[in-house]
Image (cartoon, grey):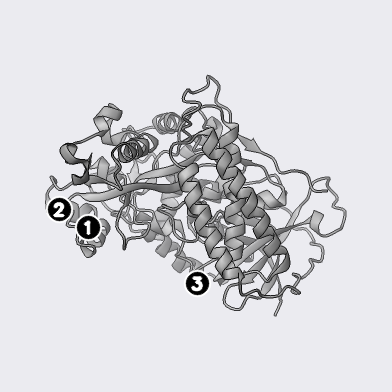
Amino acid sequence: MHSHMKFDVAIVGSGLAGLSVALHLAQTRKVAVISKRALLDGASNWAQGGIAAVLDSGDSHEQHVQDTLIAGAGLCDEAATRFIVEHGREAIEWLIDQGVPFTRDDSAELGFHLTREGGHSARRIIHAADATGHAVQVTLEEKVRKHPNISLFEHHNAIDVITSDKLGVKPQHAQPVCHGLYVQDVNNGDVHTFEAEHVVLCTGGAGKVYLYTTNPDTATGDGIAMAWRAGCRVANMEFIQFHPTCLYHPYAKSFLITEAMRGEGGLLKLPPEAGAAAGKRFMPEHDARGELAPRDVVARAIDFEMKKRGLDYVHLDISHKPADFLQEHFPTIYARCLELGIDITKQPIPVVPAAHYTCGGIVTDMLGRTDIPGLYAVGEAACTGLHGANRLASNSLLECLVIGRACARHIEAQPRQASPILPAWDESRVSNADEEVVISHNWDELRRFMWNYVGIVRTTKRLERAQHRIALLKDEIDEYYRNFRITSDLLELRNLVDVAALIVNSALQRRESRGLHFSRDYPNTLPKALPSVLTPAPRR
């Protein structure tokens, strides 16, 4: 059953970006929030660390900007960075007003405990114990569910954006304009047309393109792929942040061990499999900042030690700290490790680097606008220039809040316009029983070769090998997509392959090593930092 629905704004994604945009707009607009799974199944819900903002008189906007620029390895957009940092406090105050239960500290200026993470020159991370994202998401979810102007579509997959050039009508402008999107109900397979003057892509990153990731299963780069297919530029996709410390355990999928654990004194050591070197700290040999070096340095160091010694993991040890301190500061990690038979008060934690954050994305300005009028992107799917070549810890949730608010205000200021009639989805395709097998096989193949060829350390030969494999996969998937009824798995695989191609093509363009992109063939950093911007071929 196909249906046609009309909203003022359709938001794709239900993380912090999507929910905050929805709440800002709901006073004056009719809003749809489209979520692939249940509302809380995105990466924001998993964020442990916190949100970076200048909240103490001993800190300054200038220091936060400088820390961000240093981490970003010369590639941050300074104007965007200043804008986001300077609006940090009001974003946090908005969350406090919504009722988010941040960890209190009555001796602090604002009354909340601030922690410090790698790359920050001051304590400026406001958090809710070690489950900040969950606390924020649960608070906002309750408000969104109750709001009469917000319609929720859980278990719905966005397929593609509908732009004026697909309608066969000549737009008033030379460039295409966004009018809505096609969305599939996961439970029954029906495809619906969502008509909306403004579409906001808040779909998160693309960690699932890699074999090891800290991301939830929903992180398949959907918004980035949809915007690219619609004709938007995409930038800096080679900069995939690998979190240095993901729990290594056969039964624990994607469980992150927060950076704050190293901030509070956790040490990286070699495991028993390292033979005579077992128990030895290795970070000081790689960087004078040791365990508190930026994430890219720590991830490369672990990758180097693992490859050099043939290890599957290394150890993160914080057992020298008092047990009650660990239980108070890291209750989630303490409990999860204990379930798996690891007592972090007495034993080290086995860890491995894993794909964590997509620093690049859809090119947007500070209002979240993409190249296509009516189409916006906020959060990890977007590239504002804040993160440059390497994201500074806890700046991501801040970006969601600040750009989300600016985006909502911009949409509210736009005059209402009439929409053209949008066509229904073509329902003539048939199901194919072989499809499931082929898709799961392709998904597995893609994630493995991306891990092996486009991982933490790259070479031109490996990248070209990946490019060749992606082209073959893309042909196969495109044929399925044209001829057979779509499924969630097919949609996600189609998006992942598009995003994998963007990552590889961006990486091949960059003839240097900078931030998160490290190439053996080009180990030096060029004097001038330039973003790698990819532009889609014009439609014929």
Cα separation, mark 2 vs mark 1, equals 8 Å
When asked about the image quadrant of residue 335, the answer is bottom left
The residue under the point 53% across, 69% down is 147
Q: Which residue is mark 3?
A: 146
Q: Which residue is mark 1?
A: 334
424 left or right of 413 in image: right
Task: Name the residue nearer the viewer: 433 or 195.
Answer: 433
Cα separation, mark 3 vs mark 2, equals 42 Å
- The amino acid pointed to by label 3 is Lys
Residue 462, label in figure: none
Label 1 Cα crowd, 10 Å radius (few <14 / some 14-19 / many 20+) = some
Cα separation, mark 1 vs mark 3, equals 34 Å
Q: Position of residue 247 (x, y in %)?
A: 30, 53
Q: Which residue is mark 2?
A: 345
Q: Position of residue 447 (x, y in %)?
A: 49, 53
The secondary element bearing badge 3 is classed as: helix
When asked about the image quadrant of residue 270, the answer is top left
Q: Residue furthest top?
A: 527
The residue under the point 22% across, 57% down is 334
Q: Residue furthest right?
A: 170
